Amino acid sequence: MTKMAKLALAALPFVAMSGPSLAQDVTITLQSAFPTSLPVINTIRQFEAEVEAASGGTIQIELAEPGAIVPPFDIQHAVSDGEIEAGYTAAAYLHGSLPVASFFTSMPFGPQALDYMAWFYEGGGLELNQRMYDDAGFDLVTMPLTFTGMESGGWFNSPIEGTNDFAGLKLRWSGLASEVLASLGADTVLIAGGEIFPSLEGGVIDGTEFSFPQVDLALGFPDVASFNYFPGWHQPSTMIELVINRDVWDGLTDSQRTIIDMAARTNAMRSVLRMEYSQAAAVAQMAEQGVDVRLYSPETLDSLRVAWDTLISEMAAADPFVAEVWDSLQAARTQEDTWDALTVAPMQRP
């Protein structure tokens, strides 16, 4: 089975449902941590429309932009507390207080998008993600809504010839990768996406990661940074989640919950397909704008990998749940690698 066929199987068929079980009406305020106009992020608008159409209008979703109700990094807490009904965000934004959360968004040298999806839907990742929130006292339900592939490896105003060049730089980086760079001497900070451009422009930060080329281009990074590095060692794939207040979720009918789940799975497939299709053109456009698009040296990637291996070993030794999540991920990747060894071979090109 091809990788694309695996992706198709990850999403359930999306069909409209109707009947007496949809009798109650509900309005869900859903705040995004990201501007919903951004490429691929904007698939949430299709999710919104499909949920409303499939439910016969009994579920109305009111999307709110970042910061409209609560700060972007506070969404999970606000949903849990009932301040808003739902959110579209990244678990990794909880990294400071809940480091294991980053494994449910992305991780350095992690799985590719289709393998990551397979772990969530078939390998127990979704159940572990929910358990993390339950054990931490959050009163919410989580599910994947968007998957993306590899991100840009970082934007800088000076070249990165080796890992020594990270030392002393103030970098906007998130999640587990921020700890890798900190171990190499960087000063890492986490700021919201909308604040990155002025921070780079004003010299508040020396470099950043945020997303894949299409989004970075839309945010204007080529105007304020000279070098864009690849590959995205820090985020080979990313999952952005939908979180819904537990009481709101429990108050829905079975049919309404099924509609939301199916629409979310459909959007997960849609997002990764749209992302994969569009990035080469975005990179070419950045190069036309004068961006120096470079590859990290093999030596730099090797050093980053060594730093990551050290970090994950320390985290797993200190936290049994981190160890359980990491072991689950590694088991899934071993299965994928074993299958790929039998099925991925050089193909004759047309």
Image (cartoon, rainbow, N blue to C red):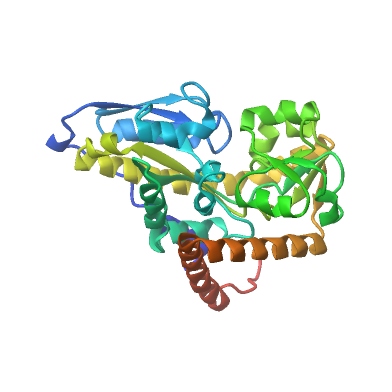
| Outermost residue toward the top in this view | 68
Q: How many marks?
A: 0
Q: Quadrant of the C terminus?
A: bottom right
**What residue is rendered at 20% in x and 43% in y?**
254
| Residue at 59% in and 49% down | 276
Lateral position of residue 236 relative to residue 67, left or right: right
Front-most of residues 277 and 183:
183
| Percent x, y of residue 43 | 48, 36
Q: Is residue 183 above or below residue 83?
A: below
Q: Position of residue 214 (x, y in %)?
A: 65, 39
Residues 328 and 144: in front is: 328
- Nearer to the camera, 21 or 198: 198
Q: Residue furthest left?
A: 20
Of the pair 82 and 17, the residue shown nearer to us: 82
Q: Residue 172, image x and y in percent?
A: 70, 39
Q: Looking at the picture, how far across and down is residue 33, in whole percent?
A: 52, 32
Is residue 16 something that shows in the picture?
Answer: no
Horizontal side of 16 relative to 206 (left or right) equals: left
- Left or right: residue 164 compared with residue 238: right
Position above or below: 277 against 214 = below
Left or right of 125 in this view: 153: right
Image-quadrant location for residue 50: top left
Q: Residue at x 55, y 28 (%)?
A: 37
Viewer can see residue 34: yes
Q: Quadrant of residue 244?
A: top left
